[in-house]
Amino acid sequence: MNSPRDKTKAALGPTGCSSLKLRQLSRRVSQHFDRIVTDAGLKTTQYSLLSNVVALGPVKPGVLAAHMEMDASTLTRNLQPLVAQGWVTVGPGDDGRSRVVEATDAGRAKRDAARKDWKRAQIALNERLGDGRVMRLHALIDECLALMSETEDHAQPRS
């Protein structure tokens, strides 16, 4: 904040739409990762989901969705291409009503092959933004997620 204009903007507080700004950043980061991870035959969202299934599986869809902070319908939609490729199975759980998501051997192999590309993408992002900025960004995102969870957990029902 060097110029008087920058100081004036800071004194006014946040302006604009935070949702839009976050979506813009998310799209830009996703495009960066997709350009590199696509070499392994996966989209970034697919790599992330497959990695979580490998790490947590076998896992109930609700637990997986909560861990990834997504709703059940988004999880179901995002699992479909992984199931179609034979990288993930969704089968019966402990009782007739529950389901379990699990990576197949082919899915684990796909994730392992894509991990190198994901790591290249992460290193390239770190180099472009700077390690310190990425660490601060992660910390800020984690802090905001925790605050948003607290807000949602304590939200009063509307009448």
Image: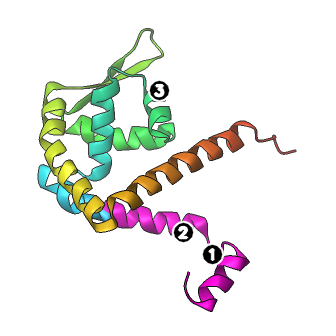
As measured in the structure, the alpha-carbon distance from the residue carrying label 1 to the one carrying label 2 is 8 Å
Q: Which residue is identified by label 2?
A: 20
- Horizontal and vertical percent for residue 49? 33, 39
* Magenta stretch prevailing secondary structure: helix
What colour-coding does the image apply? rainbow
Residue 16 tag number: 1
As measured in the structure, the alpha-carbon distance from the residue carrying label 1 to the one carrying label 3 is 35 Å
Q: Which residue is identified by label 3?
A: 63
Q: Is residue 51 magenta?
A: no
**Kind of residue sitting beneath label 3:** Val
Q: Which is closer to the viewer, label 1 or label 2?
A: 1
The magenta-colored residue range is: 1-30
Pick whichever, 130 or 43, lies toward us: 130
Residue 113 tag number: none
Give the mark nearest the N terminus, 1 or 3: 1
Q: Is residue 8 magenta?
A: yes
Residue 73 horizontal side relative to residue 87, left or right: right
**Kind of residue sitting beneath label 1:** Gly
